[in-house]
Amino acid sequence: MDSSELESDILRRVRALLRELDGHHPSCQSDRESHPCCPSSGMLRWTLHKRMDQNPRTSCVLVSILVKELERAERGDLRHYIIPLLHTLMYTLIQVRQHRGTAAGAAPGGHQRTGEATGATQNLEQPLRGSRAPGQPQAPCIPDELCARVYDFCKRLLTLPKPFCTIGLDYASRLQLERAAPGTLYQRTVISEQSLPSAAFPCQDRIFIFADPELLPEAICRALAMDTQAAQVSQSPRGCMSCVVTHALQAALGDTCDTAGLRARLQALPPGDVEHWFQQVVAAVEGSEGGSDRGQRTVQLERIYHSLLGSSPKGNAPQEGLQGTPLPSPNISFHLWTEDEQLWKELVLFLRPLSQSCEPEGLGQELEPMEMPDSLPGCGCCGQSRFSVLSTDSGIERDLPAPEEPCERSRLHRKGGIKKKPSPLDSVALLQAGGGKAPGKALGRAGMAPEPPAPLQRLHSARVVLLGDDRILGRLAQAFHSLRKREARRVFLTPRLDLQFYHIPVVPAQPQPSAAEHAGPEELCEVAGYLGRADPWYESNINTLCHMIPKLATMPSRALVTDLFLTDVIAYYARMGTQPVCFQVHSVKVLFQDPAQDPAEDVFLTELLTQVQDSPSPRELSTTKRKSTLDGPGMDLTVTYRRVVLSERQKELALSLRSSGLLMKAIPAEEAAGPGCLTVTITEIIRTSNLAGRSFSAVAHRFRTRSIKVRSAEQRPFTVRLDKDSRRTYRDVIGLEVSPCLEPSYCLQKTRTTKCSPEETEDVGLVKYLPKSLLLPINTFAGVIP
């Protein structure tokens, strides 16, 4: 395929992707469900990027076409095209090196690079055509002028409302960094995702996939576990380090880089030498992050290149055409969610692996033993289930070892000194991060203000991907609330860990027996439906997996398809989905019929359903069976709620009626409503008398509220089910109270303020700076597009 045919083919695919976003080709939802490989936007996007990996020449043409389509969408005010095109473009730019253009038109050593024009009037089509001199394999490159057009486009997005300005600012910052030091985005992505050792960029990023084995069939869980394990086996630290070295030298040296010889040399080196050159390359690239001395960076990388290849002559590499360096798959771990505290345990072990648990500087000093769960496994060398540190300090000053500094300073340091009063701003920042105590006293030299402790940096990022329907999100809301309560008592994870949540809806072909009786596949994925209506790119790439994953997992030739497609889509979602949509978590207090039974407190995310209990207790049979028979079905309820109106004024209302049950929905049917209120539907039983006798009819009353109280007037029990999960069902309930769940750190600080000033009723001091409601963020590609 020549250049014109290649460009026409890619343009046709990009236009098909845009038509899919337009809704011109719904492609019949039934066709998508029956044909898992039907060309949806997500499949088209995956095909484009896979083709780029197989043929690096495609990436240059793809970038050029995407830039033109972005500018066309801007001129035509087609805003729903902008974010999908921009994500697709940036995902390509991460993997492709930048053409050095006029800033470094000459190759190191003063030789003009073959096939590249200099000057401001450089022909953009020339590098896109892939022209090269004989004997010089060329890596795919993007002209600097084309990157400048993308950068200017991102800056123009700053004049638009959210999420366009947010995404534009993020990508403009990345492009600025990439233009100053080409290859930096690729290098940082690989280092963080593979947890490679690097002092210059010590960041770690991991994807945790959680699936509930009771909600998904065993075949799906087994297939997903095999796919993620296969993706991890194919990636080794040595191979990832070699990719970083190769990509960085390609970006710095351009066409003079003998890619084939470099790869062969790195493959022949022992692992220790590969890591040595990896550290040298990372230090050179990160040292020029500010772009102040780009030429010095190029000289350093050229020196590394010649040290690796020795004195081999240039231009003797075989003619293999364009050679790219694909982005390795991220570090993905698959977990079956079988324990309530499993999420918190995995996050703790991510921050402090078991290999560090016996070190004095390990987890024992960061967490109190009482905060560690009893079931958290200990390290193999000490066989303990809790982390502890043995103190060897007798407390006597003369037992201290001989100091390396004057004794006077040691004595002053040990005795303490000035007690520093923490800054209110520091306390607010700490509480907003996760609650807990403000910074305590710090020790310093006599007569000098003590040095404040260095702020903790979030060097770890945990991307938790939830596979399933709304029921697993209900479990996530429970775990998130428990984590926030733990962090309010003793902050540990929050200041060190960037925790982000992702959701991929999966509904098996045949729903599990534990599914809600009256809930279909659409009703089980209300959160995903809301996210799809708010973000069309999420709808195209993620919601289409709802019925695709079960079909792919059971295909006979599954190994030929899913180990590439599923892991790639999950990686793309975790890398590019950075805009959260926040959902209000609601708390519920359940009152039981037995006065001796303490009320239960729980949280829910999507819905709460109450129904008349089918099997009444023996005591109720003796007192109310005759009355219920005469009065008909249902039970008498007293409902007190605050109605929400358009003016945002809350009006206290109360009603009494006979009802067969009520349903509280927290996810609105329209994205314009916003996930902040409860939509309550009460089914009232109306009795009518006529000549034929008595008859009963059902009338639905619907209203919106933020808090509600329900009581059974006749003490007849009913059941309460949370988040469509039959495992979270309460029986023998006679009352419940529902309200927005408060942030635990807010409650803790509010309690402290109330103890100090009991007469204060409004939020004062630090409390008014804290978030009041507990919101569960779920990441999408664009957030909520207005």
Image (tube, rainbow, N blue to C red):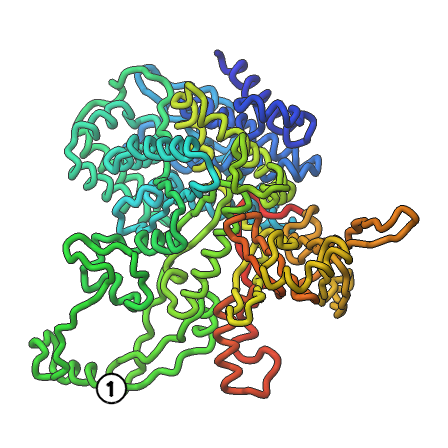
Q: Is residue 687 visible?
A: yes
Q: Front-most of 236 and 324?
A: 236
Q: Residue furthest top?
A: 1
Is disc 1 surrounded by few (<14), some (14 to 19) or many (20+) residues within 10 Å?
A: few
Query: Dividing the picture into quarters, in which one does residue 763 lie?
Result: bottom right
Dot 1 amino acid type: Ala
Q: Position of residue 426 (x, y in %)?
A: 43, 73
Q: Front-most of 9 and 509?
A: 509
Q: Front-most of 410 and 229?
A: 229
Q: Position of residue 563 (x, y in %)?
A: 39, 28
From this view, report whether residue 6 is shown above or below residue 194.
above
The residue identified by callout 1 is: 446
Q: Residue at x 62, y 64 (%)?
A: 734
From this view, report whether residue 68 is shown above or below residue 769.
above
Report whether 389 appears left or right of 685. Answer: left
Report whether 106 appears left or right of 628. Answer: left
Label 1, secondary structure: give it: loop
Q: Residue at x 32, y 43 (%)?
A: 191
Q: Residue at x 43, y 37 (%)?
A: 571
Q: Residue at x 30, y 79 (%)?
A: 442
Q: Is residue 127 visible?
A: no
Q: How many numbered dots are placed on residues in this image?
A: 1
Q: Position of residue 385 (x, y in %)?
A: 24, 59
From this view, report whether residue 203 is shown above or below residue 652.
above
Query: Dividing the picture into quarters, in which one does residue 406 lie?
Result: bottom left
Q: Position of residue 219 (x, y in %)?
A: 42, 31
